Image (tube, rainbow, N blue to C red):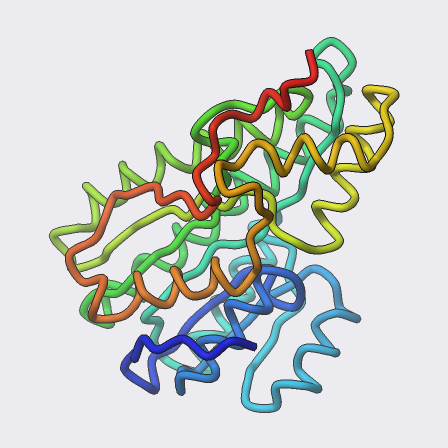
């Protein structure tokens, strides 16, 4: 793991949703490295067990953020274990279907919205009273550059991520007087298994080769790059540190400057 230079006050209590793998795990391990008390939740019990085995000082809870009962139980555990919350990272999400709008099934739409949007609302609704009780803090929502452009064949995912930007700005207005900053990070294509699966589905839908689709995704960025999970974690750390104390209500791209998401494939 690349060590960020940014310093953050140690001992703060951090919740990372979907924190057992991928971007979430990188974020959790970055805050752990900087001396924070990190609590992660994840729907994948096996991945959570692996994360906790590697990061012995962290605490974890198996939870589905789209189920309000499980969210309530998660926050009861956080309150019992830590008695406070200082930083919230809402990272839970699914890619959703890759299909034209007329081919999207109701269940696929509902599941994507339930996790990518409703889940973030349920988590934040429970987190805010604890953040207020702590005297303020930081909320960082992991959105997507699809929330800035739109993205063909990804209607449910794109709708949820655009909604997250609206909620980020609304919550920044609501919570600013309580010293709570709210920002959204909008990564481009992030290296890892998840984007590999997205590319495979996109290639299948378009009847093109995986290599051609991957090259098209790389061309979306002015820097012709996929970003690293650590790039996202570094910005989350910055926004949650004293260096980000005046930043709120922002949707920040981490993408090497995306020029568009139409893939230039016709």
Seen from this angle, which residue lies furthest front? 223
Residue 91 coordinates in the image, percent (x, y): 53, 54
Q: Nearer the viewer, residue 11 or 147?
A: 147
Query: Which quadrant of the structure image shows residue 96?
Result: top right
- Classify 26 as above or below 146: below
Residue 42 in the image, given as x and y percentages of width and height: 65, 63
Residue 103 sits in quarter: top right
Position of residue 161 measured from the top left corner of the image (x, y, whole percent): 50, 34
The quadrant in which the C terminus is found is top right
> Left or right: where does residue 54 sit relative to residue 133?
right
In the image, taking residue 93 as reference, residue 100 lies left or right, namely right
Report the residue at 48% width, 43% height from top: 143
250 is higher (above) or lower (below) than 243: above
Kindly identify the residue that appears in the image at 75 percent across and 68 percent down.
45
**Vertical order, 100 against 74 (above or below):** above
Count the marks. 0
Q: Nearer the viewer, residue 255 or 47?
A: 255
Instruction: Tell me the quarter of the image containing the N terminus.
Output: bottom right
Give residue 113's position: percent from left, percent from top. Answer: 59, 33
Res 217 quadrant in image: top right
- Left or right: residue 42 compared with residue 159: right
Q: Residue furthest bottom?
A: 56
At x 63% / y 38%, what residue is drawn?
218
Question: Would residue 11 appear left or right of 75 to someone viewing this image?
Answer: left
Q: Note whether 114 is above or below 33 in the view shown.
A: above
Residue at 52% over, 37% down: 221
């Amino acid at each position: 793991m690349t060590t960020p230079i940014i310093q953050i006050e140690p001992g703060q209590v951090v919740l990372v949703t979907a924190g057992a793998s991928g971007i979430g795990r990188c974020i959790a391990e970055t805050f752990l490295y900087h001396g924070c008390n990190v609590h992660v939740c994840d729907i994948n019990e096996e991945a959570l067990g692996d994360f906790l085995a590697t990061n012995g000082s962290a605490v974890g809870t198996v939870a589905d953020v789209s189920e309000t009962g499980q969210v309530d139980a998660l926050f009861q555990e956080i309150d019992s274990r830590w008695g406070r919350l200082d930083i919230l990272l809402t990272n839970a999400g699914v890619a959703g279907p890759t299909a034209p709008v007329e081919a999207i099934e109701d269940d696929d739409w509902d599941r994507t919205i339930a996790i990518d949007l409703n889940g973030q609302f349920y988590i934040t609704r429970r987190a805010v009273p604890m953040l207020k009780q702590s005297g303020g803090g930081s909320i960082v929502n992991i959105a997507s550059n699809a929330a800035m452009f739109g993205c063909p064949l990804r209607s449910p995912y794109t709708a949820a991520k655009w909604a997250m930007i609206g909620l980020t700005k609304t919550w920044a207005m609501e919570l600013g007087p309580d010293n709570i900053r709210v920002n959204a990070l909008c990564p481009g294509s992030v290296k890892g298994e998840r984007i590999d699966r997205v590319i495979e589905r996109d290639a299948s839908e378009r009847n093109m080769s995986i290599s051609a689709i991957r090259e098209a995704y790389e061309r979306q960025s002015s820097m012709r790059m996929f970003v690293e999970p650590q790039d996202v974690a570094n910005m989350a750390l910055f926004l949650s540190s004293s260096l980000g104390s005046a930043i709120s209500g922002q949707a920040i791209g981490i993408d090497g400057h995306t020029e568009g998401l139409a893939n230039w494939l016709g």
